Image: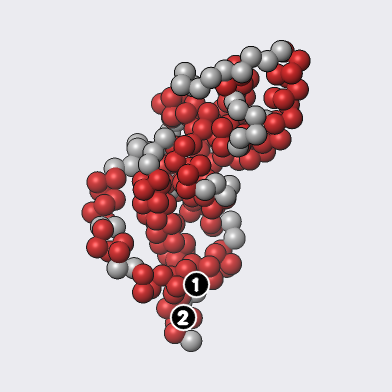
Amino acid sequence: MSEEKANKLSKEEKDRRFEAELMPVIGPLYNFAFRLTLDEDDANDLVQETYLKAYRFFDYFEQGTNAKAWLFRILKNSFINDFRKKSKQPAKVDYNEVESYYNTEDVEGEGEMAATSDMRSQAVQELIGDEVASALNSLPVDFRTVIILCDLEGFTYEEMAKILDIPIGTVRSRLHRARNFLKEKLEKYARTMGYDADSETEE
């Protein structure tokens, strides 16, 4: 935040704008915190810390910009710096290992099957309900985060890049792999429920 120019506000104006612009985001912010921590108490603590930091640095927030993205970035940084250290989440995903599983050639060769895979994934999701949440929660936190930001919260790639402090190319790559992991988990569950995705597609 040191690179941004602070706008000096009176306490009354600061409180008014803070309430009007940032507090409406508390619902999505809590959902994001819970998806990261998978714990209600930790999620509440993380949201509280996020709002405390947001109030402290509110003079740096530019009115008219995306308040939700600004808060999500603060929460993400707080999670990484504080909560992740004491979290029971798995260690940071090894992207080299992931690359060996979804290598560049495989990713580029998926175009012909994209429509079939998307239709299959959509059909599976209609059957499994809460299993989507369970599968999402089982992903490594870095993959889970991009799914939440893009598919649940609707952030653009540009906004996600700013929230996560990574290049847009990395956002795209990480999201692609996250969706593949999630689709694989959901299709496995669908098969255990007696749903034959391949035969349904052939029909």
Q: Is residue 170 visible?
A: yes
Badge 1 vs badge 2, beta-carbon distance below 8 Å: yes
Residue 16 in percent (x, y) is at 75, 22
Q: On screen, 173 above or below 26? A: below
In the rendered structure, the answer to whether residue 14 lies left or right of residue 104 reads right
- The correct choice, above or below, for 21 with respect to 169 in the image is above
- Residue 39 visible in image: no
Q: How many marks?
A: 2
Label 1 crowd bin: few (<14), some (14–19), many (20+), radius 10 Å: few
Please tell me which residue lies in front, 113 or 68: 68
Where is mark 2, residue-wise? 201
Mark 1: which amino acid?
Met
Judge by depth and name the residue closer to the eye, 166 or 144.
166
Q: Residue at image x 71%, y 13%? A: 10
Mark 2 lies on a secondary structure that is helix
Q: Which residue is mark 1?
A: 119
**Could you tell me residue 157's position as x and y percent?**
47, 48
Q: Quadrant of residue 109?
A: bottom left
Work out whether residue 183 or residue 154 is closer to the camera in this orientation and state it.
154
Q: Nearer the viewer, mark 1 or mark 2?
A: 1
Which residue does the image show at 30% across and 64% down from the upper left? 108
- Secondary structure beneath label 1: helix
Q: Along the horizontal axis of the image, is 99 left or right of 134?
A: left
Residue at x 23%, y 54% (from the top left corner): 100
